[in-house]
Image (cartoon, rainbow, N blue to C red):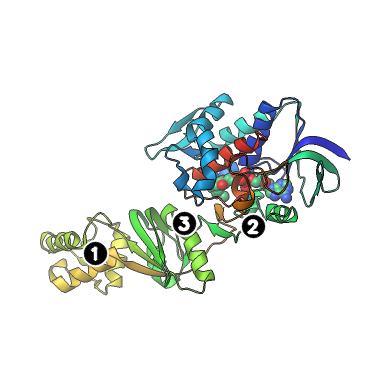
Amino acid sequence: MKKTDVCIIGAGASGLCAAINVHRNYPDCSITLLEKLPRVGKKILSTGNGRCNLTNVNVVPSSYNNPDFVTPVLEKYSPAVVVEFFESLGLKTFTDREGRVYPRSNAASSVLDALRFACQNDKTEVLCEYITESVKAQDDGFVINNDLFCSVLIISCGGKASPSQGSDGSGYVIAKSLGHSVTPVLPSLVPLNVLPEKVRALKGVRASNVKLTLFDEEGSDTSVGEILFSDRSVSGIAAMELAAFAESSLRGGNDPILSIDFLPEFEKEELNEYLRSISIIRANQPVDNMLSGILPKSLGISILKECSLYYGGALIDGFNDEMIASLTNMIKDYKINVYGTRGFQSAQVTKGGVDLSLVKSASLESKLKKGLYFCGEILDVDAKCGGFNLQWAFASGLASGELK
Ligand SMILES: Cc1cc2nc3c(=O)[nH]c(=O)nc-3n(C[C@H](O)[C@H](O)[C@H](O)COP(=O)(O)OP(=O)(O)OC[C@H]3O[C@@H](n4cnc5c(N)ncnc54)[C@H](O)[C@@H]3O)c2cc1C
């Protein structure tokens, strides 16, 4: 049987960082990186729309679902340290106005190249198209697929989101076989499926700085940002950030409703006043132009239609207070029933994962088995869009690679 000192299952963002840090800390150690796909780090290439938003300078523990657990790792591997780490691999980055960090090349391939080049050394072996199906724990280590023995094992298989990029949930099966429990997993950061009748007219409309509230009989979640309508779904970061709430609501037998405030910066009275003034300023214009000073035209027309105020040929002149109040209400509270999400196939992240109560928070070593570590999205750690999830993948990969 082949033997190696450290084996890492999954050569994604976290596994590659783990391999690099094991090599930096223990240069004499032999490392074997197992990757089921034909190449390492495939998912990294599609992150940030191909630009890879690799971290965010505004990361704090409360950016994540389990702040206490992530604190020690983020204290040691803050966004600044992650950026320094990439600098040490030859990658230049820049930070945008929202604090999101990207490679200076604006190409995700630069991030992947930096990681994979650093794994090219005489102590690290990368085995692609190697699917880990079983792991057996022994007193002195682990046996993988009955053909590879390692003293230390790092599991970095990712979650279930975007399985075409390798993360198909098989890591959970491996974790469970080693005695670890897994919390229920949900697709997160994925478009919301809505009733086509409600959005067909809005297909292709993009609205920015909107406030979304997704609520059901038991609670609510909110987000602010951009949304994009297709013929049967609402996407864009603000909508995608509510997907996990939608999934858990639907699984709980509830009927979540999305309320869109298209102009959150306006109080209702202020908006009413504005529309009253428009009804005077644009009195001789066709109704089509009633909302074009504040909303994209097609969105404005859809809102007029929803309020039954869109009559071909009519002029704005005829708008009375009641009509204006109904427009204001529709702009501030446009309701759409959500009946699902696009699911794991299209999700960017998994919510839930390996139960943190059985994992040490600083070293990421298992509390059940010495020499077993977890890092990245396989753990029950997730965050919203903006570089937070890769920050966790990189930071936790580096932390696990210390083998403390
Ligand atoms: C389209 C998209 C865009 C995203 N954009 C961003 C972004 O801009 N910023 C951000 O912060 N986050 C982004 N994310 C999320 C981020 O990519 C993930 O959180 C991160 O990649 C998780 O890293 P990981 O190493 O834990 O898992 P992964 O990157 O999923 O890597 C896991 C690896 O393990 C391998 N593997 C799995 N099972 C096995 C097995 N049984 N045997 C062998 N190998 C196995 C997989 O093939 C894969 O290569 C995006 C995600 C997607 C899908």
- Mark 2 lies on residue: 182
Question: Where residue 240 is drawn, which disc sits there?
Answer: 3
Q: Which of 203 and 140 is in front in this view?
A: 140
Q: x%, y% of residue 25? A: 67, 27
Q: How crowded is mark 1: few (under 14 residues within 10 Å), some or many (20 or more)?
A: many
Does 290 sit left or right of 219 as displayed?
A: left
- How many neighbours does mark 2 have within 10 angstroms: few (below 14), some (14-19), or many (20 or more)? some
Q: Can residue 182 be seen in this view?
A: yes
At horizontal 50% and vertical 60% (from top left) the residue drawn is 244
Find out whether the residues at labels 2 and 1 contact each other: C-beta distance under 8 Å.
Answer: no
Q: How far apart are marks 2 and 3 (CA)?
A: 24 Å
* Residue 77 appears in view: no
- The first of marks 2 and 1 along the sequence is 2
**Which quadrant, please, contains the C terminus?**
top right
Label 1's element? helix
Badge 1 is on which residue?
288
Say what amino acid the circle numbered 1 marks. Asp
Q: Where is residue 303 in the image (x, y as percent from the top left)?
A: 29, 67
Q: To which quarter of the image does residue 56 belong?
A: top left
Between 339 and 156, which is closer to the camera in this rendering?
Answer: 156
Q: Say which of 138 and 218 sits in front.
A: 138
- Please give the name of the residue rendered at 58% of the width and 52% of the height, measured from the top-left corner: 380
